[in-house]
């Protein structure tokens, strides 16, 4: 249900690419000028996928997710919980 011409930033872009969606590594979000350029290039929006690696005990992976949520204005588009794992998709609305 992603809009046409959108991009998902995620720890696992292969999953979205397999489904025919544009995707890239989440760490690109730490480069503000690059992210601003991506927002211009993808008129359908740029999304943050909060997946498994955001829920894992690996501190570095979780920190990247927390930083994205703290540093950018996001709007949640979908969310669900599976056992102790919270999964969500957020749209970047402002840098």
Image (cartoon, rainbow, N blue to C red):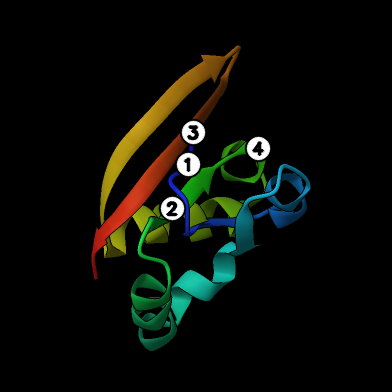
Task: Kindly identify the residue that appears in the image at 65 percent across and 55 percent down.
Answer: 11
Determine whether the residue tagged by mark 2 lies in a helix, strand or loop.
Answer: strand
State the residue position of label 3: 1
Q: Position of residue 57 (x, y in %)?
A: 65, 41
Q: Position of residue 89 (x, y in %)?
A: 44, 39
Q: Are marks 1 and 3 in contact (CB under 8 Å)?
A: yes
Q: Nearer the viewer, mark 4 or mark 1?
A: 1
Kindly indicate the quadrant of the structure image that contains residue 27. Answer: bottom right
Query: Counting other residues with Cα less than 10 Å from the Cα at mark 3, is it few (<14), some (14-19), or many (20 or more)?
Result: few
Q: Which comes sooner in the sequence, label 4 or label 2?
A: 2
The front one of 54 and 26 is 26
Check the image and report above or below for 81 versus 25: above
Q: Nearer the viewer, mark 4 or mark 3?
A: 3
Q: Position of residue 74 (x, y in %)?
A: 27, 51
State the residue position of label 1: 2
Instruction: Decide if residue 15 is on the left or right side of residue 89.
Output: right
Q: Nearer the viewer, mark 4 or mark 2?
A: 2
Distance in Å between CA atoms under marks 4 and 1: 19 Å
Task: Kindly identify the residue that appears in the image at 37 percent across and 87 percent down.
Answer: 33
Distance in Å between CA atoms under marks 1 and 2: 9 Å
Kindly indicate the quadrant of the structure image that contains residue 52. Answer: top right
State the residue position of label 4: 52
Determine whether the residue tagged by mark 1 lies in a helix, strand or loop.
Answer: loop
State the residue position of label 2: 47
Q: Quadrant of the C terminus?
A: bottom left
């Amino acid at each position: 249900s992603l809009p046409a011409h959108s991009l998902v930033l995620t720890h696992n872009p292969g999953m979205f690419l397999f489904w025919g969606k544009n995707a890239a590594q989440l760490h690109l979000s730490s480069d503000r000028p690059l992210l601003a350029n991506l927002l211009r290039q993808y008129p359908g929006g740029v999304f943050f996928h909060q997946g498994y690696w955001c829920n894992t005990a690996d501190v570095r992976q979780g920190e990247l997710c927390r930083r994205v949520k703290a540093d950018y204005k996001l709007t949640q588009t979908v969310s669900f919980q599976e056992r102790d794992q919270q999964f969500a998709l957020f749209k970047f609305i402002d840098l």
